[in-house]
């Protein structure tokens, strides 16, 4: 006797969102992200999907990531202006600088691919 598994049928937008969320979970597991951060990323991915749509094939990932790193650096600078600078913020600023250098290489690769 053959049993058919109950597999939900997803529309294209739902399938695209599921693929994005699966990718976030895979990266989170691989890089040992804390659960609270993984959940934050999942929430932001779902919100971005709702806002921007299903097609992620044309997203300039490296360029977007570089801009997000710039935002992180700017928030640190604002925190410093507010007198909230700490050793933690200093380390974050250092890591943002390293991330920016690495992601910029990916931006250049994207530009070369056209």
Image (spheres, rainbow, N blue to C red):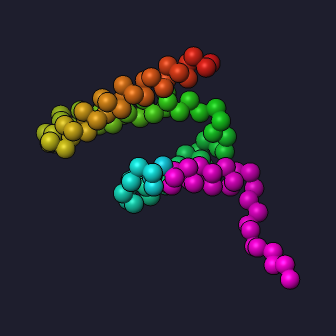
Q: Quadrant of the N terminus?
A: bottom right
Residue 10 as seen in the image, left or right of residue 88: right
Q: Residue at x 21, y 39 (%)?
A: 91
Q: Nearer the viewer, residue 76 or 30?
A: 30
Range of residues picked out in magenta: 1-26
The answer to whether 17 is drawn above or below residue 56 in the figure is: below
Horizontal and vertical percent for residue 37? 39, 54
Can residue 87 be seen from the camera position used here? yes
Residue lying at the far top in this picture: please name it: 112
Horizontal and vertical percent for residue 2? 84, 78
Residue 4 located within the stretch drawn in magenta:
yes
Horizontal and vertical percent for residue 65? 45, 33
Horizontal and vertical percent for residue 86? 14, 42
Residue lying at the far right in this picture: please name it: 1
Q: Nearer the viewer, residue 97 or 76?
A: 97
Q: Residue at x 59, y 49 (%)?
A: 20
Q: Residue at x 55, y 45 (%)?
A: 48
Residue 32 located within the stretch drawn in magenta:
no
Q: Residue at x 74, y 59 (%)?
A: 10
Total marks shown come to: 0
Residue 83 as seen in the image, left or right of residue 42: left
Q: Quadrant of the C terminus?
A: top right
Residue lying at the far bottom in this picture: please name it: 1
Residue 36 as seen in the image, left or right of residue 108: left
The answer to whether 105 is drawn above or below residue 24 in the figure is: above
Residue 77 as seen in the image, left or right of residue 60: left
Rendering quarter of residue 6: bottom right
Can residue 82 be seen from the camera position used here? no
């Amino acid at each position: 006797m053959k049993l058919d598994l109950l597999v939900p049928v997803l529309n294209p937008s739902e399938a695209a969102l599921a693929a994005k969320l699966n990718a976030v979970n895979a990266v989170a597991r691989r890089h040992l992200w804390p659960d609270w951060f993984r959940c934050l990323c999942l929430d932001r991915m779902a919100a971005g999907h709702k806002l921007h749509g299903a097609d992620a094939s044309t997203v300039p990932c490296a360029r977007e990531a570089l801009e997000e790193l710039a935002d992180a650096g700017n928030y640190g600078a604002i925190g410093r202006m507010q007198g909230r600078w700490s050793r933690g913020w200093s380390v974050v600023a250092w890591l943002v600088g390293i991330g920016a250098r690495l992601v910029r290489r990916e931006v250049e690769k994207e530009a070369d691919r056209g």
